[in-house]
Image (cartoon, rainbow, N blue to C red):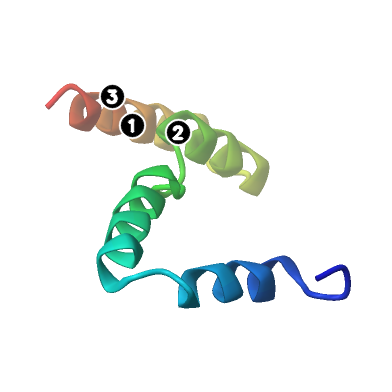
Amino acid sequence: MADMTLEQEILEVVRKMTPGQQRKLLEQARTIRPQGTPGKLAVQYAREIGFEKQDLAEMAEAIEEWCER
């Protein structure tokens, strides 16, 4: 197994599982995968792009309002 990539090793293990075990693993994997860019990080990226301060303020406000829902 030393020459296998991480993906290959995961696939080898998954292929040995029952369909029920594979389903449980998939459900678990879906809970730990990244879910997009956090709002504050998106604003930081926007600053790096060079948006106007007023535009950044409006974006930050919209993100905060959306997150409060």
Q: Secondary structure at mark 3?
A: helix
Judging by the rendered image, the residue that carries numbered circle 2 is 56
Q: Using the image, tell me which numbered label, if any, was put on residue 58.
A: 1
Q: Position of residue 50 (x, y in %)?
A: 62, 44
Q: Secondary structure at mark 1?
A: helix
Q: Using the image, tell me which numbered label, if any, was put on residue 64.
A: 3
Please give the name of the residue rendered at 24% of the width and 28% of the height, measured from the top-left corner: 67
Given residues 11 and 33, the one toward you in this image is 11
Q: Amino acid at mark 1?
A: Glu
Q: Amino acid at mark 3?
A: Glu
Q: Residues within 10 Å of mark 1 (few under 14, many from 20)?
A: few
Q: Secondary structure at mark 2?
A: helix
**Lower sequence index among marks 2 and 3:** 2
Snapshot quadrant of residue 32: top left
Please give the name of the residue rendered at 45% of the width and 33% of the height, measured from the top-left corner: 56
Q: Amino acid at mark 2?
A: Leu
**Lower sequence index among marks 1 and 3:** 1
Q: Position of residue 45 (x, y in %)?
A: 59, 42
Q: Position of residue 62 (x, y in %)?
A: 26, 32
Q: Residues within 10 Å of mark 2 (few under 14, many from 20)?
A: some
Circle 1/circle 2 CB separation < 8 Å: yes
Please give the name of the residue rendered at 33% of the width and 71% of the height, measured from the top-left corner: 18
Q: Position of residue 30 (x, y in %)?
A: 35, 53
